[in-house]
Image (cartoon, rainbow, N blue to C red):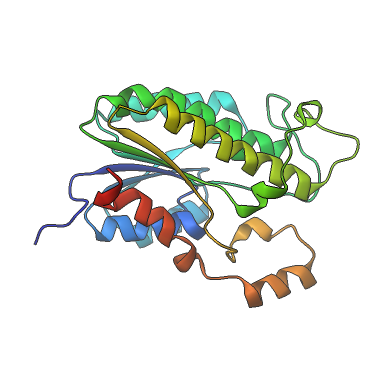
């Protein structure tokens, strides 16, 4: 039996849980080989055990751009093929934090890490017969505003504003990348997965988490758009 993604090589950031894990599971079921990029942890070990032998792990700390460079170097050293890059990982801390390079944490992890990773892996993808870059954003980008003065922290920090800003950056990046890749065999798409019950809301107050758990969709449902953008032949 031929699987539609047979022999395809896919890299997913944050593939050890939530939407990323469900995306990896579905793509492996379609025949793909998947590398999940995440921190080394018991959670990652459990994800790898559940995904089976078609899944591998490369360690990365997305809050450190040097670690992102290390991830790209490790992937390029081990693989001569990358068919789909899924920029999936994200966080939503309620308290202000900074990355290793001093950027506001959400902007650094949700956007800058994926911007850099994409740039480092793009030459390999341009060498494939066809390739796809899929970026997971959020409809909250509509409330986002790029405030360059806040990119290294703000005395008036708002977790929601920072999240919206990072997701707007995702959309702007993916859209401009699509423009620049026009005429090549590489596509760039960005998506809103829906309101999904994942660990990204773990820092919110318990009553809010409880309410969101009642109205949000499952990670399996939230992964459907990522899977579509990674696999649909009509999008070549």
Q: Nearer the viewer, residue 69 or 227?
A: 227
Question: Can you give x and y, in whole percent of width and height, for residue 216 in the image?
Answer: 61, 70
Q: Residue at x 20, y 32 (%)?
A: 129
Q: Quick check: 15 above or below 224?
A: above
Camera sees residue 78: yes
Residue situated furthest left in the rendering: 1
What count of labels does the image hold?
Answer: 0
Q: Quadrant of the N terminus?
A: bottom left
The quadrant holding residue 7 is top left
Camera sees residue 54: no
Q: Residue at x 29, y 52 (%)?
A: 231
Q: Quick check: 111 above or below 217?
A: above
Q: Nearer the viewer, residue 125 or 21?
A: 125
Q: Residue at x 91, y 35 (%)?
A: 155
- Decide if residue 153 is on the left or right side of residue 47: right
Q: Quadrant of the C terminus?
A: top left
- Decide if residue 201 is on the left or right side of residue 69: right
Q: Residue at x 45, y 67 (%)?
A: 220
The quadrant holding residue 197 is bottom right
Question: Can you give x and y, in whole percent of width and height, for residue 196 in the image?
Answer: 57, 64
- Decide if residue 149 is on the left or right side of residue 21: right
The quadrant holding residue 178 is top left
Q: Nearer the viewer, residue 117 or 73?
A: 117
């Amino acid at each position: 039996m031929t699987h539609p993604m047979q022999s395809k090589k896919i890299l997913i950031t944050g593939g050890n849980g939530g939407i990323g894990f469900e995306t990896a599971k579905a793509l492996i079921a379609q025949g793909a080989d998947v590398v999940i990029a995440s921190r080394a942890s018991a959670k990652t070990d459990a994800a790898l055990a559940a995904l089976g032998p078609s899944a591998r792990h490369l360690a990365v700390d997305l809050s450190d751009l040097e670690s992102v460079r290390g991830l790209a170097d490790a992937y390029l050293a081990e693989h001569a093929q990358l068919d789909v890059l899924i920029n999936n990982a994200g966080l939503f801390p309620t308290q202000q934090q900074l990355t290793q390079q001093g950027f506001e944490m959400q902007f650094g992890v949700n956007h800058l890490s994926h911007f850099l990773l994409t740039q480092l892996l793009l030459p390999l993808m341009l060498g494939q017969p066809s390739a796809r870059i899929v970026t997971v954003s959020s409809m909250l980008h509509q409330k986002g505003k790029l405030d360059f003065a806040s990119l290294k922290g703000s005395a008036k920090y708002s977790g929601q504003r920072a999240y919206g800003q990072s997701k707007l950056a995702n959309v702007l990046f993916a859209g401009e990348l699509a423009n620049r890749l026009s005429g090549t065999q590489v596509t760039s798409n960005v998506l809103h997965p829906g309101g999904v019950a994942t660990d990204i809301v773990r820092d919110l107050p318990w009553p809010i988490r409880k309410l969101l758990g009642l109205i949000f969709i499952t990670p399996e449902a939230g992964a459907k758009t990522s899977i579509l953008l990674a696999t649909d032949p009509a999008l070549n």
